Amino acid sequence: MRNVHFIMQAKGGVGKSFIAIIFAQYLLEHKSDILFADVDPSNQTFSQVEALPVQYIRLMSDNDRQVDISKLDFLYETILLAPGDVLIDSGASSYIQLFTYLGTDYGLKFFNEDNCRVIIHVPVVGGEARNVCMEKLYEMVKAFSGAEFVLWLNNYPYKVFKGSDNDMLEKDPYFIKCKDRIKAIVTMPEFPEDTFGRALKLLMDNHKTFNEVLDPSRTVYLGNNPVTSLQRMRLKIIKQKLWESLSVLDVLI
């Protein structure tokens, strides 16, 4: 059985592309023949990472005013013809159209009939956006009966739940309605912003992967300067902590 991973959330700025970039690197250490696709109409962050074999699929019409259904058909066909697993990074600006497309009678049914397991990864952030993110999770759970779900708790810049994540999450009204469909919960680790957080931001801003910067035989630039030994040590620790968090996904890959 092949796995088709969609990263979806109607709320913008919640870390969809960050999750795609991190998860793609994790997947590559476990599997081969993976199709990575970036369908975000506004920010093609995923496909800017040159070390990852990401295909950008344009969904917008020629006038950039709306999603072109024929291009959604092309995306669908691309997924069905892929030799192995698939990871799709979608954007907030195309959420409604992709949600509607996948939610039709045939939307997920064709994937299931083609022996594909569909897994929807839903990021949730803290602060005022949390309730919106959880509401959209519930919206997708109701609409996509043929899918499994992964909840990503992104604690940057605000902690999603104060106190114990597990205790507070269990009391969330939307989570209570969805919990039977959620196969895994990834709690993103928190890092000191001025040190480890800065190193991670440099990595992302310069579209590099962990393997690129952690290879001591290579001279890799983050901005105008080569990676320092201290940055490399911090990024090594960051990768270890992220991989520990992502290990809950091993049953889904």
Image: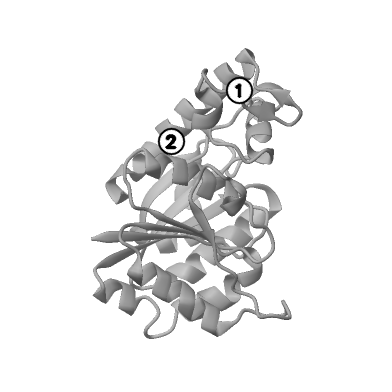
Determine whether the residue tagged by mark 1 lies in a helix, strand or loop: loop
Can you tell which quarter of the image residue 62 is in?
A: bottom right
Identified at 74% across, 31% down, the residue is 223
Q: Is 226 left, or right, of 74 in this rendering?
A: right
Three-letter code, disc 1: Thr
Identified at 60% across, 82% down, the residue is 68
**Colouring chosen for the image of the structure:** one colour
Q: Is residue 105 above or below residue 141?
A: below
Determine whether the residue tagged by mark 2 lies in a helix, strand or loop: helix
- Location of residue 117 in the rendering, given as x and y in whole percent from the top left corner: 30, 63
Pick whichever, 50 or 76, lies toward us.
Answer: 50
Pick whichever, 144 or 3, lies toward us.
Answer: 3
Can you tell which quarter of the image residue 30 is in?
A: top left
Callout 2 crowding tier (Cα within 10 Å): few <14, some 14–19, many ≥20: some
Identified at 52% across, 24% down, the residue is 214
The answer to whether residue 157 is seen in the rendering is no
Instruction: Count how many numbered circles sit on residues in the image.
Output: 2
- In front: mark 2 or mark 1? 1
- Location of residue 50 in the rendering, given as x and y in whole percent from the top left corner: 57, 45
- Spatial distance from mark 2 to mark 1, Cα to Cα? 29 Å
Screen quadrant of the N terminus: bottom left
Mark drawn on residue 219: 1
The answer to whether residue 64 is seen in the rendering is yes
Three-letter code, disc 2: Ser
Residue marked by disc 2:
245
Pick whichever, 41 or 148, lies toward us.
Answer: 41
Mark drawn on residue 51: none
Q: Earlier in the sequence, mark 2 or mark 1?
A: 1
- Location of residue 21 in the rendering, given as x and y in whole percent from the top left corner: 53, 45
